[in-house]
Amino acid sequence: MPHLRLALSQIDPYVGDIARNSDEVVRWTRHAAERGAHLVAFPEMALTGYPVEDLALRRSFVDASRAALGELAARLAAEGLGEVPVVVGYLGRSEHDSPRLGRPAGSPQNCAAVLHRGAVATRFAKHHLPNYGVFDEYRWFVPGDQLSVVRLHGTDVALAICEDIWQDGGRVAAAGEARAGLLLVVNGSPYEREKDDVRLELVRRRAAEAGCALAYLNMVGAQDELVFDGDSIVVDADGEVLARAPQFEEGCVLVDLELPAVREDAPAEGAVLADGLRLVRTDLGGEVLPAPEQPVVAGVAPRMGDEEEIYAALVAGTRAYVRKNGFRSVLIGLSGGIDSALVAAIAVDAVGAENVYGVSMPSAYSSEHSKGDAAELARRTGLNLRTVPIAPMFDAYMGQLGLTGLAEENLQSRLRGTLLMAVSNQEGHIVLAPGNKSELAVGYSTLYGDSVGAYGPIKDVYKTLIFRLARWRNKAAEERGETPPIPENSISKPPSAELRPGQVDTDSLPDYDLLDAVLQAYVENDQGRDAIVAAGFDPAVVDRVVRLVDTAEYKRRQYPPGPKISVKAFGRDRRLPITNRWRRG
Amino acid sequence: MPHLRLALSQIDPYVGDIARNSDEVVRWTRHAAERGAHLVAFPEMALTGYPVEDLALRRSFVDASRAALGELAARLAAEGLGEVPVVVGYLGRSEHDSPRLGRPAGSPQNCAAVLHRGAVATRFAKHHLPNYGVFDEYRWFVPGDQLSVVRLHGTDVALAICEDIWQDGGRVAAAGEARAGLLLVVNGSPYEREKDDVRLELVRRRAAEAGCALAYLNMVGAQDELVFDGDSIVVDADGEVLARAPQFEEGCVLVDLELPAVREDAPAEGAVLADGLRLVRTDLGGEVLPAPEQPVVAGVAPRMGDEEEIYAALVAGTRAYVRKNGFRSVLIGLSGGIDSALVAAIAVDAVGAENVYGVSMPSAYSSEHSKGDAAELARRTGLNLRTVPIAPMFDAYMGQLGLTGLAEENLQSRLRGTLLMAVSNQEGHIVLAPGNKSELAVGYSTLYGDSVGAYGPIKDVYKTLIFRLARWRNKAAEERGETPPIPENSISKPPSAELRPGQVDTDSLPDYDLLDAVLQAYVENDQGRDAIVAAGFDPAVVDRVVRLVDTAEYKRRQYPPGPKISVKAFGRDRRLPITNRWRRG
């Protein structure tokens, strides 16, 4: 059987930074070539970063991507890396009209190319375009209509991009019909909780359907609301896992594959395969190689547990947002409560304690323990803490306006928001917002108050999960012999906004266990009011929660972005009208 | 030639309020039937409102829409309106799998039905789905695959929905092949500046292509960022305009049509037409009618001028947002400048002066004329004005923090934002944000300061257009013998944020004429930096503007919604990453 050493480059491209991404492709190709790789792959749209959103509609950007692809091919050859074929995703243009979509030839496409010996040996575009959840790919792209196969060292490698294997038929079926020895899929597949299990099952099933080995390469890092968790996988035709990369870690997965020789019954170039895909075969040459005496052992990286994985995603999202936007330091309002404490712990892990600035902003309603818990958090993590009481500002407003009730409560929160923004403007830190998903869902937050910030690290995390993550993070520290970052009192005391005397969250909301269960049904599962009641929840609670969620839509629209960890995050994942008179969920 | 009296119901459906919308269909059907109509049409998704966005993905809502459709048919008959066929848009489900999109049978569809004699006589789904600009219809719907024709009073009426006539081929070509006598198109077509001209030209061209008369019905009102301007049109097969409805006005357009008799060479039921559309013909009966002795004269409503039309759109958007969300009154920070003055004038026209509350919030840097101009605005319009100086709050913050430069400037703006929100919370008014498109583009505003609000009436209006609208509104008042609302001084003085002594906008920005021209090229036309420079603009100015626009993306994400009037509004129309290292425009 022909041998192929495959290198999957699980890297972190930067959206819009084509020069940097090209450098990364060269750097990691050299890394792979030095280790004897015969084929090197990079993720979906690695050259431009992913997703580029409406940059895809800008001619200058598409032209730059296409030009950079040619330059990259030449540069790889010039640097002595021309012999190893490199698969790299980029933003290209369609060759034909797409009348069904009303798009002319030359429209943007989500492409990948194989670079070899200083030139673009072949190129193709994603066939299945996702247009659900966070994806709008029919907005940006027209689908590709061919199956590209590269013949290399005596075996046939079929190529596909991301969604191509999430839909039935298409390139998976076509790869089978083409009698490929390997199906290589390059991805920009965003993290979701427990998606690694789904992904493994999918990869195995598609390998069986294509009847060949399957290599699945995903990117790492984060881009705005999306986190990419890596988790690249190689399976053989029987679905046996040959290699699996670590989650959230940049690196190169090398794997030695013994693949079937080119099949005599493989269809001819130009054959029309499943879904109308036309077979385009490119012979890259290379003699048939024997299995190496010392095969590389990629190994199967251990899987993280649920809390560890989610926490890692929150850290990755926060780090990427801060760094890729050119900031070094972050600012957080510390109330002594669990939400801001968890955000602080995430921030410390993302950018280092020396770059995390906390402000305690007590009011007349702040308890002694709150101030103490904030100080204890700072002591445990080493972040920089200052205290600025809001009484003088509060008195100034009350003297002018004479506010009562909710207006008085919200005022305190907004005074803190204004204070944080002032310090941010003065000192150049980026503000992190401490809102969690339960609060965002029911609008239990103050617009322009506790919602201020450039990024909301826990906006997709329900309150019940906040508690689990805090306990997990402390336990992980203990196991490493470190100081647990989050004060026990922040975890164990009843949650309170402390905007009036003796206030606790359960004055206004159901217990979080109940609230989060109803929210899970309504938000994640898109169930209507009647279906949720039929599942056994108290109708009065369901009606109240549904009403709260619907009427808080205007607040969520003005909330900062934050890392998506659930199957349906607030943001692009869930697009509901603000003006909405539907009252039955 | 058979005669048909057609009624186009140019109404304002409410998103999610199926019961109210059903009542409206009954009410306007009665109106039309009393006037002898033979066919009554309602807009795209009139039963659910449009666009419903992700409500389309909620089973309970789709079921409610489908159930309401049947109930509506029965109710029309029960109320003696069963004999006149009624075309009504609703949210339905697909009958077949859509493998190319990976969607099973039963997936949501953008449908219309013909109700007749207590039942649904026929139903069909939109064939061309828009998935660009503000539209995400591949996210929500699967396309329909038939051409529905109703045979009525001896003529054939082909049916289509909105985008079906914006794309080449499809239902327009199929209607021609089916030899229809009339093509009736129901729409939810959002307002854009000068779109009425585009629309008329399109309607005429499509009538020629289909070889028959064409009736184009659009909705009025507004939904979140979209304004619907009505402008329903009927043309004969030669493109001659037979009727045209007023812009932005609810009403029923009645038109007497003399149409060709059913053609003997019309293809058989089930024939496959252009784009694979299958012909479904429904015979609704009705004898061939002679032309009436006294035909109705629908007439052609006069077109508004550019400023009048835009201003009407801003008023419609603001009124709909306030009222449909259950508010009565609005609150505006009045600086004495032209932006807040124009917003106040719009608000007064939208909800009445007695429901408009203004707050003047002078600081030490506010000029005397600013305070005077705010008072003069209140005097001219009759809105409710109060004055609350921000000095005490400013001093309280400065005493605690010692801010300088930009931090000190932004503080003043945020103190005003907090003050407005406090009054809003205390008194129940909705806050309107006064930001214009030029400011939003370059980030010349303070997040959580002058950007606070539930709705931004002029967020899609460039500063140069603000001046034109203000002058137009004053002139229109003069022509009606009313007091011009906007003080001349607010229009003529140099724009200034008044956040430091002697500050004017041109300290930080190019002249607005130049700035807006560059923004038009970069935002509306999606031109890259090099193309804009090649068009003759100063490279240094272009580089600076492009950089400002790109780095202000995070601010725009947190800005409230406002009415879209341009071809590309900030919001769903323009989806760019925040984290974006592309620096060449």
Image (cartoon, coloured by chain):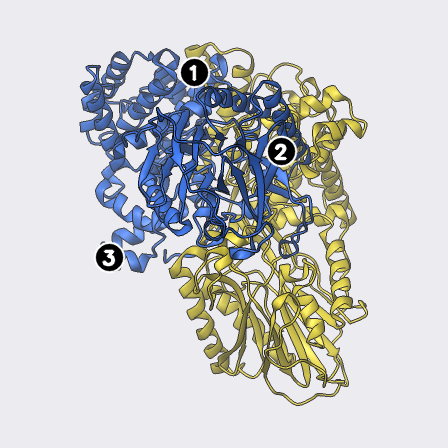
Chain colours: A blue, B yellow
Residue A420 in view here: yes
Q: Amino acid at mark 1?
A: Ser
Compare residues A460 and B471 and report the one nearer the observer: A460
Q: Can you tell which quarter of the image residue A55 is in? A: top right
Q: Amino acid at mark 3?
A: Ala
**Is B327 located above or below residue B187 in the figure?**
above
Q: Residue at x 57, y 60 (%)?
A: B12
Q: Can you tell which quarter of the image residue B170 is in? A: bottom right
State the residue position of label 3: A535
Residue B155 got which mark?
none
Q: Amino acid at mark 2?
A: Val
Q: Quadrant of the N terminus of chain A?
A: top left
Mark 2 or mark 3, which has the lower sequence index?
A: 2
Q: Secondary structure at mark 3?
A: loop
Which of the chains bears the disc numbered 3? A
**Is B522 located above or below residue A427 in the figure?**
below
Tag 1: Cα neighbours inside 10 Å, few (<14), some, or many (≥20)?
many
State the residue position of label 2: A120
Compare residues A208 and A62 and report the one nearer the observer: A208
Cα distance in 3D space between marks 2 and 3: 56 Å
In the rendered image, residue A92, in percent from the top left (x then y), is placed at 62, 38
Cα distance in 3D space between marks 2 and 1: 42 Å
Q: Residue at x 43, y 48 (%)?
A: A166
Relative side of B578 to B496, left or right: left
State the residue position of label 1: A329
**Is B72 located above or below residue A495 in the figure?**
below
Q: Secondary structure at mark 1?
A: loop
In the rendered image, residue A41, in percent from the top left (x then y), is placed at 49, 32
